């Protein structure tokens, strides 16, 4: 754990940890919650669901989810139910040959900005481990809305399990740091383009783009956002059926489309 890497050994894992593993040459990471006994609960596309982008990015996202090699795994074959996308897998199937990393919570602004990639840490603090595990197990039975790479992906699922926070407006990007990074990169390039009018210094333009990128990540982090609400997992499970969720921190009813 540290500035350059969140890599962790399997024997150091504890129930309630938010873990992830990079897929497809470090382009995309798959996230989940370690619940103990070598098991991970995580969120992916349910069978028959579209990935949700309609772009070449869909090819990358096909690598997410548990081992789908066609070879039965004796450790988790009886525990996989992909009808709603939330699944339980053994740790090895979750990693799918990748390296194990642990997501960091409650990091300082300096450490957050020093991280080159989104989707590895957050300014938000985690709830107690027993609450995290309860949320993950509850959602394993009830699902976690419809999968969408930008609004409701595996990292959003893990962050919710850790914090109980959801983005109130579904018309915007979700909590996912890696989704914000995907959007932030092109945004930085666009916003830094006017800088070319005043300088031809390539280093100056690069510094401006990096600054915009880091600022967009920082402002959009779930620990800074004002469009998030605390939702109890039982209320979320009930809201999946009714399309309305109860915000625990405000008592307000929130319109929240639950169906795909």
Image (tube, grey):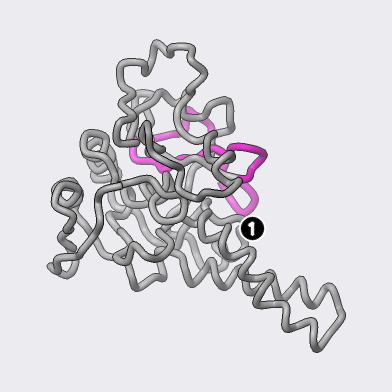
Write down the residue under mark 1: 116
Give the residue displayed 58% in from the left and 25% down from the top.
97
Give the residue displayed 62% in from the left and 54% down from the top.
3
**Residue sitting nearer the eye, 119 or 59:** 59
Above-or-below relation of 254 to 41: below
Q: Number of labelled discs? A: 1
Q: Secondary structure at mark 1?
A: loop
Above-or-below relation of 51 to 201: above
Left or right of 211? Residue 41 is left
Left or right of 149? Residue 185 is right
Residues shaded magenta? 1-27
Above-or-below relation of 126 to 199: above
User: Does the magenta stretch mainly form a helix, a strand or a loop?
Assistant: loop
Q: Horizontal and vertical percent for residue 59?
A: 58, 39
Q: Horizontal and vertical percent for residue 141?
A: 22, 34
Residue 3 belongs to magenta span: yes
**Residue sitting nearer the eye, 209 or 254:** 254
Above-or-below relation of 59 to 185: above
On the question of residue 42 being in view, the answer is no
Give the residue displayed 64% in from the left and 65% down from the top.
186
Give the residue displayed 48% in from the left and 12% down from the top.
71
Question: Picture quarter containing residue 147?
Answer: top left
Left or right of 43? Residue 139 is left
Q: Residue furthest right?
A: 200
On the question of residue 99 being in view, the answer is yes
Q: Horizontal and vertical percent for residue 240?
A: 20, 48
Left or right of 135? Residue 29 is right
Q: Horizontal and vertical percent for residue 101?
A: 53, 40
Q: Residues within 10 Å of mark 1 (few under 14, many from 20)?
A: some
Question: Picture quarter containing residue 7?
Answer: top right
């Amino acid at each position: 754990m540290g500035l350059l890497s969140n890599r962790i050994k399997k024997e150091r894992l504890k129930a309630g940890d938010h873990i992830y593993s990079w897929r497809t040459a470090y382009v995309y990471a798959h996230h989940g919650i370690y619940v103990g006994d070598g098991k991970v609960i995580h969120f992916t596309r349910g069978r028959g669901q579209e990935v949700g982008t309609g772009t070449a990015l869909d090819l990358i996202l096909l690598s997410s989810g548990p081992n789908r090699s066609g070879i039965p795994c004796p450790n988790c074959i009886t525990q996989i139910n992909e009808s709603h996308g939330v699944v339980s897998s053994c740790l090895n199937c979750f990693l799918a040959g990748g390296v194990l990393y642990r997501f960091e919570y409650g990091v300082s602004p300096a450490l957050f900005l020093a991280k080159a990639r989104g989707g590895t840490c957050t300014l938000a603090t985690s709830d107690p481990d027993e609450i995290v595990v309860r949320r993950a197990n509850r959602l394993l039975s009830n699902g976690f809305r419809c999968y969408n790479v930008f609004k409701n992906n595996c990292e959003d699922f893990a962050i919710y399990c850790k914090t109980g926070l959801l983005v109130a407006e579904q018309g915007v990007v979700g909590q996912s740091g890696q989704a914000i990074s995907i959007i932030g990169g092109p945004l930085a390039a666009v916003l830094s383009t006017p800088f070319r009018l005043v300088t031809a210094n390539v280093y100056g333009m690069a510094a401006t783009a990096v600054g915009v990128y880091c600022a967009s990540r920082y402002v959009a982090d779930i620990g800074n956002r004002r469009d998030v609400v605390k939702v109890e997992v039982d209320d979320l499970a009930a809201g999946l059926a009714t399309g309305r969720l109860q915000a625990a921190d405000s008592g307000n009813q929130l319109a929240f489309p639950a169906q795909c």
